[in-house]
Amino acid sequence: MENLLVILFSVILVNNFVLARFLGLCPFLGVSREFKSSLSMGAAVIFVMTLASVSTWFIQYYLLIPYKVEFLQTIVFILVIAALVQFVEMVIQKVSPVLQKALGIYLPLITTNCAVLGVCILNIREDYSLLETIVHGAGGGIGFTVAILIMAGIRERLSLGRVPKCMQGFPISFITACLMALSFFCFQGFFAH
Amino acid sequence: MAVVLVSLIILGGIGLLCGIALAIASRVFAVKLDPRIEIIEKALPGANCGGCGFPSCHAYAQNMVEGGAEPNRCVLCDAEAVGKISNVLGKAAATIEKKIAAIKCYGGSTAVKSFDYGGIPSCRAASLYSGGDKLCSYSCLGFGDCVEACPFSALSRSGREAPIVSRDRCTGCGNCVAVCPKNVIVLIPRKASIHIACNSKEKGKVVRQVCEVGCISCNRCIKKCPESALSMQDNRVCIDYSKCTSCGLCIEECPRKIIKDINPREEASRAVNQ
């Protein structure tokens, strides 16, 4: 239990996918203009990361390792994640139009993101059990959501402020992201004994 | 060799399985969309301006088919497009009245200021500081929030003067009306030519002190109007466009020159008639 909590909090705060590992920066900067859309994006990432973690864990331990083709990991993972997310999107469209409206366009956007692939490969590299994999996947998504929500809050404020012309748009966003990463750096060593 | 074969089988197998599964899923989970939505969406302009009250043209099309929204809410559609949409919906063709945005304040830089504002250059931000830096609390603040909000670039401004509405570009979508913290912008019928450019509800004496181009409630225009289209409400001249004949007598009568002709083409035709 303690182990799971440590995994959860370390992936949210210490090894945050965006701010410490620098994965998934594309949606982090692209969709963080408004608070509302970044919340939807975050929800989609939590969903896809958990789903991808579980499915790739099974692929790794019941297909790739028994047949000794671990070198296919990257391509097989991408294939499986992409197909699975497509499938889930179809099911959601049929079953729940409300959920489709909330997650709809963000699901295919995040499918082939490096953060999603990253979480799957890290699960294998760290030798996580299935339960640990689920926690790590969901935690990764929560960490992304936290980061993108903070970013969206700051950017909404910045959009009103007087930013020098040469810094408007992406330059100021990059600097904001950099300062956020620095502040998250303080969590480093939080769980070390 | 065996490794190559195994990896081929595994990768190919997964690809094939996923492909088949997705093909089946697309059949099983197919959602039937009303084909009318697509036809209507094509007839709509696709500007996603939000003037109809829905977030996008697609949402409006969907609501017309499923929710029973009226087909004449689009501010960009001409009569032909509305007729086409009504046809698809099987409704009687609805009439449309084109509108245009008009700014009810020409105070601009001449309006007397109460303090020097040095904060964020935005009307909404400035109005948070005791209603802005102008003594007249009904005036245009001139930071151009409406200019930024306009999806058709129909508004332009220079300095802190009141923005100018371009008749060619304005579609009457109302985005500027929604964003203005002072409620200085109104939507008036596009055909109208008389526009009363003062928003103040103060009495004449107060207006005189804070603004050179404010309505002083002298009632001269109301007395002059032959159609009794003008009336005084809350110390503000109001116009009933259903009665107004654009004769222009009020424009000449106004001592403060706040009644404007905003439709010069109408003026030209009036001169011919006289």
Image (cartoon, rainbow, N blue to C red):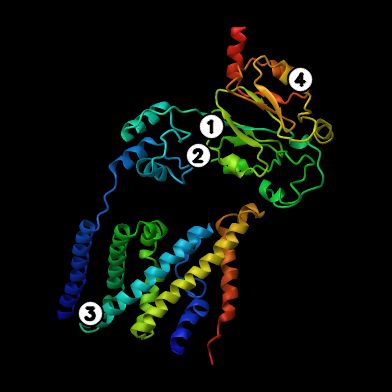
Q: CA distance from mark 2 to mark 4?
A: 36 Å
Q: Is residue B82 visible?
A: yes
Name the one closer to the observer, B226 or A131: B226
The crowd level at tag 3 (other Cα within 10 Å; few <14, some 14-19, many 20+) is some
Q: CA distance from mark 2 to mark 1?
A: 14 Å
Which badge, 2 or 1, comes first in the chain's sequence? 2
What residue type is disc 3 on? Answer: Leu
Which badge, 2 or 4, comes first in the chain's sequence? 2
What residue type is disc 2 on? Answer: Gly
> Mark 3: which secondary structure?
helix
Residue A9 on image: x %, y %: 50, 81
The answer to whether marks 3 and 4 mark residues whose Cβ atoms lie closer than 8 Å is no
What residue type is disc 4 on? Answer: Arg
- Answer left or right for B212 relative to B122: right
For disc 3, the marked residue is: A63
Which badge, 1 or 4, comes first in the chain's sequence? 1
For disc 2, the marked residue is: B51
For disc 4, the marked residue is: B220
What residue type is disc 1 on? Answer: Arg
Q: Residue at x 31, y 69 (%)?
A: A81
For disc 1, the marked residue is: B169
Asked if badges 2 and 4 are on one and the same chain, I answer yes
Asked if badges 1 and 4 are on one and the same chain, I answer yes
Asked if badges 2 and 1 are on one and the same chain, I answer yes
- Answer left or right for B132 relative to A123: right
> Mark 4: which secondary structure?
helix
Which of the 4 image quadrants contains residue B86?
A: top left
